[in-house]
Image (cartoon, grey):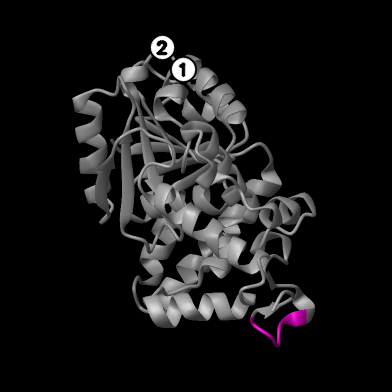
Amino acid sequence: MKHIAVIGSGTMGNGIAHTFAQYGFSVNLIDISEDSLQKGLDIIQKNLDRLVAKETINEVKKQATLQNIKTFTNLKQGVGQVDLVIEAASEDFAIKSKIFQQLDVFCPPETILATNTSSISITKIAAQTKRSEKVIGMHFMNPVPLMKLVEIIRGYNTSDTVNRQIVELSVKLDKIPVEANDYPGFVSNRILMPMINEAIETLYNGVAGVRQIDEVMKLGMAHPMGPLQLADFIGLDICLSILNVLHDGFKNPKYAPCPLLTNMVAAGKLGVKSGEGFYDYSKSKKAEKAATRFS
């Protein structure tokens, strides 16, 4: 596999495109608008500039990486001659369902279809196609160019051959593939999201403030980032979506989203991407790295 298509140029999509391109793959980056694609390319360039500054790569490697990426707003053109498609669109089954139905029509029969979903059933996504044996979960971690883990999730019908190919491909990207079975949240978010939700409940119940909760987890549990700050970086809307998938999938009240999380998302406080979540990331607060409004 040398020709890859990535659907979605947001945080995960541009990170996946960057990683494949840096390792010599030809990448078609696909999104619905030129503006979105340009923003994605700008982020890739900034991240490559950081790697050059750290002498992780040189300028020649940076330019070669950028030249490996082509952009498309037309899905049919972008996926018509690729070996693998990785979907990194919104964590919404209706959106993913439509994309996979189109991919099944537009892609060559031998093309493998992967999804970067962080919680939605691979089997359910695969059922939207007539090639369920070629559909697999390939869950990268953010930031993709730096994080080693790729969670590999087989659907009910995913073939052994496809699973082996994706595991081997992950290794070629200098990643560590870890296989998981197809249950809501897989391994990573089945464990992570309840922890984040419990941290939000702790805040909601007035046990401690934002900074205090994060400091306890960083200093006492050796977490590099506190759960509330991590939620801001993931996106509170994404956290809510994943918790809803867990709650619906397991029918267990322990996965029910905290009312504070639900209200913050409804109010548009989504974390870093909106400028405010549990911490304030607005430009007027540049002097304060993360000034909380709840502590």
Task: Name which residue type carries label 2.
Answer: Lys
SS for dot 1: helix
Q: Do the residues labelled 2 and 1 touch (CB within 8 Å)?
A: yes
User: Which residue is under mark 2?
Assistant: 130
Task: State which region is magenta.
Answer: 285-289
Using the image, determine if residue 245 lies above or below residue 107.
below
Q: Quadrant of the N terminus?
A: top left
Graded by Cα atoms within 10 Å as few (under 14), some (14 to 19) or many (20 or more), the crowding at tag 1 reads some
131 or 37, nearer to the observer: 131
Who comes first in sequence, dot 2 or dot 1?
A: 1
Q: In this view, does 262 lie to the left or right of 117?
A: right
For disc 2, the neighbor class at 10 Å (few under 14, some 14 to 19, many from 20) is some
Q: Position of residue 289 (x, y in %)?
A: 64, 82
Q: Nearer the viewer, residue 25 or 139?
A: 139
User: Disc 2 versus disc 1: distance between alpha carbons?
Assistant: 7 Å
Residue on which disc 1 sits: 104
